[in-house]
Image (cartoon, rainbow, N blue to C red):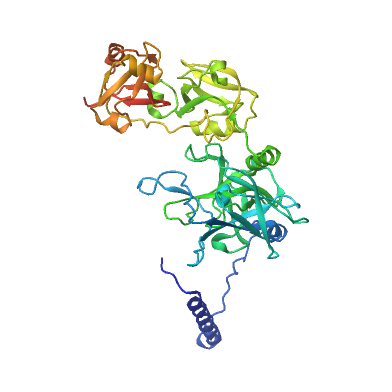
Amino acid sequence: MNRIPLRTLACCVLMGLVTAGCAQAQAPEAKADAPAATSTPAPVGSANLPDFTGIVQKNAPAVVHVEAKYNGQRREPRMQAGMPEDPQAELFRRFFGMPMMPSPEEQAHTSLGSGFILSSDGYILTNNHVVDGADTVTVRLQDRRTLKAKVVGTDPNYDIAVLKVDAGGLPAVSIGDSRTLKPGQWVLAIGSPFGLDYTVTQGIVSAVGRNLGSGDQPYTSFIQTDVPINRGNSGGPLFNLQGQVVGINSQIYSNTGGYLGVSFSIPIDVAMNAVQQIKTHGYVTRGQLGVQVKGVDSDIAKALKLDSAQGAIVADVSDGSGAAKAGIQAGDIILGYNGQPIRDAADLPPLVGMTKPGSRVPVEILRQGKKQTLQVTIGEVPHGKAGASGNDQSPVQSGSAALGMSVRGIDPDMRQQLDLPAGEGVVIGDITGPVAARAGLQPGDVILRVNQQKVGSVAAFLAATRDAKPGDTVLLLVRRGDQTNFVALTVPSDK
């Protein structure tokens, strides 16, 4: 899109107004014989549309402009899904602001974002990616005061940072309840897109509980909105019509870097839970179930003869974890956690992460076609670990065309190296068919089960796959390194 200089645009507008004025002045003479218009003018506005002025006047003073400076070049922000070279994937982008290019004599790099004041004594909330790795952080208030901020603590997994300025009597926002949000409700954002302070944008809630997968924030169920969010809005507040903060603007969905109508905010309930933990002991604790899971896709559902492709199938259970002690096994399908339905693997990590370690929660599973509920004592993710059992770890993608592989037995040295018990597993020697390759299978992958049956020899593997007919789906449990996942392969129907 071509840029039009603002000065030129203003001239065009003025010329348009002059022309319009001349036309109106000449109208009576030119159309003296025309009959008078009888149509009723359209209403200017609607009583059903909200007026945001009160929310803005009350809360704008509590929104701050954040500047983070770095000695040397700041690293680029991480993308949330896909990579730029992937033509099939849009990019989830985190925007920390408009970069300010240093002068030749300066080596500092500065990025801009937004934040909001939590309490009158100077606690401020923003995104972690706004201040991550910064050497100095400053905030600018609406009264134009610039204050140096101390980073009290951060949490990369929730992407929040708590700042503190040495000031009192500051205006503060009111905190709402993000759990009450519903699609279709009006919301409002205040922030500093492109460094433009106190810019107001509005829209509606498009969806709630939006899980973006395991790439970067597996523990967050986002609020999706159509509120225009751009560079510099990150860390700013999302308000409801009561003028309460219900979210922190964090990411957009874009393949160009610009706003495309899909924005994501961190629920304020999640953020405030983390804030209290940071203020209390300096870091955030999370619950740990102790499983690796994968979503149940159509191939897995077909292989297991399920009515629908829902739930999270357990690929591996950590020894000594709460899941292992409760009796959860590889191959179980998790349908519910603590009363909440699990429709996909991405639904599980946010619920587990928000659970207080030591809590005992019911987990509904499907095993061999029968539902049962197990009571699991939730563990704690070790502090400093980014990931945790219970999240959807990068799965091997399922294919659907042919088995196409050769297997061989596992010798004692390899078995010891892989820490496999005797009589378990065969290793893939070569990939000979297109679907095994498309599924991501590789030579050296270890197959532990075929259709939920353990295989410990080449003969056992051949026996387990021998009766597969064209169109049948064979479910494999595959280990690669320290990850174990299910892979479903469909025998080609034209063979």
Let me know if residue 493 appears in the view. yes
Nearest to the observer: residue 293 or residue 380: 380
Q: Position of residue 136 (x, y in %)?
A: 60, 55
* Residue 141 in the figure: left or right of residue 25: right
* Residue 122 in the figure: left or right of residue 95: right
Nearest to the observer: residue 245 or residue 26: 245
Q: Position of residue 335 (x, y in %)?
A: 53, 25
Q: Please, which residue is most extreme toward the bottom here?
A: 29
Q: Please, which residue is most extreme toward the front here?
A: 105
Q: Position of residue 375 (x, y in %)?
A: 61, 18
Let me know if residue 450 appears in the view. no
* Residue 20 in the figure: left or right of residue 89: right
Dividing the picture into quadrants, the one containing residue 478 is: top left
* Residue 491 in the figure: left or right of residue 203: left
Nearest to the observer: residue 45 or residue 201: 201
Residue at 65%, 29% (x, y): give it. Answer: 356
Asked if 84 appears above or below 1 in the picture, the reply is: above
Q: Position of residue 24 (x, y in %)?
A: 55, 83
Which image quadrant: the C terminus? top left
The number of numbered discs placed on residues in the rendered structure image is: 0
Asked if 14 appears above or below 83 in the picture, the reply is: below
Residue at 76%, 52% (x, y): give it. Answer: 120
Asked if 104 appears above or below 257 in the picture, the reply is: below
Which image quadrant: the N terminus? bottom left
Q: Please, which residue is most extreme toward the left here?
A: 495
Residue at 37%, 32% (x, y): give it. Answer: 397
